[in-house]
Amino acid sequence: INHSDNVSYHEALPVPTSPDEVHALGMEINQLLKSLNDQVLRDHQFVSDASHELRTPLTAIRGHISLIKRRGDQHPEIIPKSLKFIDDESARMQTLVESLLRLSRMDHVTIDQQLLDINQLVQETVENYQPSIVQPVQVDVSATPLMTTVNADSLQQMLIALLNNASKYSPADQPIQVAAQLIQDQPTITITDNGAGIDDADKTHIFERFYRVDQARSQEIPGTGLGLAIVSRLADLNQIKVTVSDHQPTGTIFTLTFKIKH
Ligand code: ADP
């Protein structure tokens, strides 16, 4: 909750002089209380979801520590396996905490936006990121500059998260395509993979915090379920539309649509 906002709201309220104005003021106060209440509920849900996600690895870590304490002396052969487990799970917790911090810092920020050519940003990002992905990434940018106003760091973070997912959820020998083009006069970026795709039932949930498709969990593909929640938040802050669709014969397309430059 941004308290400074409330103060300025309060200071800006005019003194009502007629019954109509009293009524209007009452409605405004009601609206304000409702949005405060919604925010408190959202914050509460966030803390509760985050605690749940952190408790799972923590319980597992404590289980292994207790196992080592109880049986490590007599059965030292169990120690390396338990230590590896503790190491992996604590690394996962660290990633989770870092992503949570990133999300919560984004709650009340305003960001600067610059006029830039997304062709160039796409090319640079893919070039820098290709070495850390096994799949070949094919880039196809439009012949003319694609100008839009956006925060460059946000866009880069979004692209990296989407490339990272395209890579995690598709086979090592299947290329990933990134294209920047004008579609119906609007600058767009598409990230296309040739993986297993996402069921329609899951498509509506993947941008929610901590949501992971069962397959991702069961195949133990590493992840926190926060990547797309961060993408979605960055998209809101930059007035970018993010959509997901199927790629034929198999795979997923994420499309970023930018506002037209003014
Ligand atoms: P995670 O850390 O699990 O990758 P995300 O928020 O980035 O979290 O994605 C949420 C879920 O959406 C993933 O767990 C995965 O099931 C699904 N998903 C995301 N991107 C893709 C993709 N390109 N292909 C298939 N499934 C995907």
Image (cartoon, helix red, strand yellow):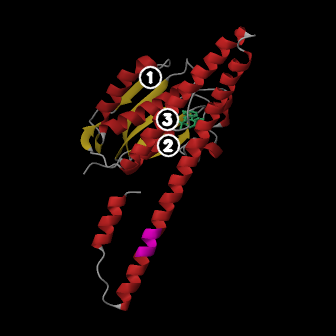
**What type of secondary structure mainly makes up the magenta span?**
helix
- The amino acid at mark 2 is Ala
Image disc number at residue 137: 1
- Displayed quadrant of residue 203: top right
Crowding at mark 1 (Cα within 10 Å: few <14, some 14-19, many 20+): many
Q: Nearer the viewer, mark 3 or mark 2?
A: 3
Question: Residue 64 at what x, y percent from top left?
Answer: 68, 23
Real-space Cα distance between discs 1 and 2? 24 Å
Real-space Cα distance between discs 3 and 2? 14 Å
Q: Based on the picture, tell me whether residue 215 belongs to the magenta stretch.
A: no
Mark 3 Cβ inside 8 Å of ligand 1: no
Q: Is residue 70 left or right of residue 111?
A: right
Q: Which portion, as a residue range, is magenta?
A: 29-33
Q: Nearer the viewer, mark 1 or mark 3?
A: 3
* Residue matched to label 2: 229
Q: Nearer the viewer, residue 51 or 151?
A: 51
* Residue matched to label 3: 97
Helix, strand or loop at disc 3? helix
Real-space Cα distance between discs 1 and 3? 30 Å
